[in-house]
Image (cartoon, rainbow, N blue to C red):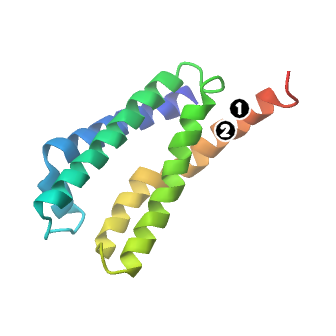
Amino acid sequence: MQWTLRLAAIYNLIWGAWVIFLPQQSLDFMGYQEATGITRTIWQGMGMVIGVYGLGYYWASFNPVKHWPIVAVGMLGKLFGPIGFLMNYLKGLVPVDMVFMLIFNDFIWWVPFSLILLKAHRASWPLK
């Protein structure tokens, strides 16, 4: 659990920094070449949020069971992100190439984060 969260922290900090400091490069990589100034600004804000998640994962890594709410908030983001992508893709607002981002930002973390949350649930049930 600790190494999973530390790996997630490193990944999120790197990804967030890439999006903040090189927004157009990261958007081009995701297949979104027509980015306007506001799109880049919102994208950079997303990078900041992802980077902050990285800090949370790092802090949670010291005691994942105790700090399960941080993992739960991260898991919610990893569930709602793909839903938001699908909604925007169906409206024609984002290119299909952006699904690549979901693999590394969301899908690969579903199982390990779920296992951490399951262990935290089992450690606190029945309530002590």
Give the side of residue 42 with respect to residue 51, left or right. left
- Which numbered circle lies on residue 120? 1
Q: Is residue 19 above or below residue 94?
A: above
Going 46% across and 53% down the picture, which residue do you hit?
106
Q: Name the residue type under label 2.
A: Leu
The percent coordinates of residue 84 (x first, y second) are 44, 65
Q: Mark 1 belongs to which amino acid?
A: Ala
Q: What percent of the width, then of the height, locates residue 58?
A: 44, 26
Circles 1 and 2: CB atoms closer than 8 Å? yes
Q: CA distance from mark 1 to mark 2?
A: 5 Å
Residue on which disc 2 sits: 117
Identify the residue at image location x=30%, y=48%. Answer: 46
Q: In x, y percent, where is residue 20? A: 19, 43
SS at mark 2 in the image:
helix
Task: Name which residue lies at 59% across and 26% down.
Answer: 67
Among the 4 quarters of the image, the one containing residue 37: bottom left
